[in-house]
Image (cartoon, rainbow, N blue to C red):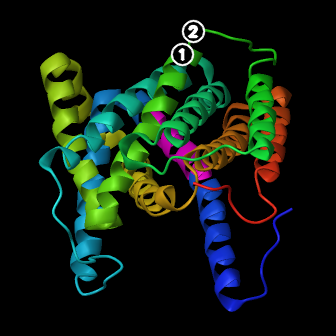
Amino acid sequence: MLVVSSSPLSYTLFMRKSLCYIISFLTGGIISVMVTFNTEFGRLSTSEVSLIINQVVGIVTLEVIMLLGYKNPLINPPRRPVRWYRHYFGGLFGVAIISLNYISITGAGATIAMAGAVFGQSLMGLVFDLTGLMGMTRMRISKRRKISLLVCLAGIVTYFLGGEGLNFYLFPSILAGILTMIQMVYNSSLAKEKGAFYSARMNVISGLCGALFYALILFPSSTLEGFRVLNTIPFYIMVGGGLLACLVVVNTNMIIPRIPAVYSALLLSSGQILTALLIDYVLYDTFTPALLYGTIITLAGILLSFEKKGEASH
């Protein structure tokens, strides 16, 4: 178990770290709800229209927040210069992620889609920690953490041992999970220099450019037809995905640099799976016990990750 020093500074650091873990888990749940909004929007119009509107909602929301909080250092902190390529590609990952999620959820349901995302995110989180890619802190994996990772892997494998088994729709969801972790690290690295809200805004601006190119160049007819039916779609479905996406990007911008990437990925994934189980049970009247068991095992592995004297050496 994690031993916390009685000094005020150590206690404060412990509380901040714990808060990051909690936010990471809750953000995973938000991701599942966001994906469901996006998928339902795509069913009622087209996935391309859902992509475009989500980015527009995000841009408007973040612009309003940044204008209202112009003098707030948490919203508009001092900004340091960065190279141009660190600005403009975060949203392009988002375009691919939303498209892949749409394919996997419409084909196999929320729980299977999120199970694939769990595997992809966890795998990529481990790669970041072991290699230090994209400026992430390179982690030295202790024996305790190796055991915890094996337990987490057992939980992930359990996801795939239920009645659904492996199927084609797992592959786009796994790729979506890998790209999600890459996007989070990319955006958080920009947030270090420019602020979480600035990074989130650049993410949706580049996402809108990518969505427009993708939709109007490759699917012009279906995209225009999708816009014609917007007046028949409930307002909360149109704006829900974009609003939640802003919250997800801002949250991950703040927490990814503060905790090991592999464990942020596992916490996000556990939140996603639990929420996806609830969504499938409530909305689609389905339930997969293997996914629940897998989540419990994964959470047990995360608990094992705590070191007796704090985090493992970097």
As drawn, the label of residue 202 is none
Quarter of the image where the N terminus is located = bottom right
Whether residue 307 is in magenta: the answer is no
Q: Residue at x 67, y 41 (%)?
A: 279
User: Can the viewer see residue 50 in this picture?
Assistant: no
Mark 2: which secondary structure? loop
- Helix, strand or loop: magenta stretch: helix
Q: Residue at x 16, y 39 (%)?
A: 209
Front in this rendered view, residue 282 or 96: 96
Is the residue 147 above or below the residue 11 in the image? above
Residue 177 in picture, x, y percent from top left: 51, 32
Q: Is residue 273 left or right of residue 189?
A: right
Is the residue 20 above or below the residue 56 in the image? below
As drawn, the label of residue 171 is 1
Is the residue 293 above or below the residue 67 in the image? above
Residue 138 in picture, x, y percent from top left: 51, 46
Q: Residue at x 15, y 63 (%)?
A: 81
Estimate how packed mark 1 is, as few (under 14), some (14 to 19) or many (20 or more) residues with alpha carbons within 10 Å. some
Estimate how packed mark 2 is, as few (under 14), some (14 to 19) or many (20 or more) residues with alpha carbons within 10 Å. few
Q: Is residue 238 left or right of residue 78?
A: right
Q: Which residue is mark 2?
A: 168
Residue type highlighted by circle 2: Phe
Front in this rendered view, residue 307 or 124: 307
Residue type highlighted by circle 1: Phe
Disc 1 and disc 2 in contact, CB within 8 angstroms: yes
Spatial separation of the CA atoms under disc 1 and disc 2: 6 Å
Q: Tell me which corner region of the image, top left, top right, bottom left or bottom right, holds residue 290.
A: top right
Is the residue 11 above or below the residue 299 in the image? below
Front in this rendered view, residue 133 or 79: 133
Q: Which residues are magenta?
A: 28-40
Whether residue 39 is in magenta: the answer is yes
Mark 1: which secondary structure? helix
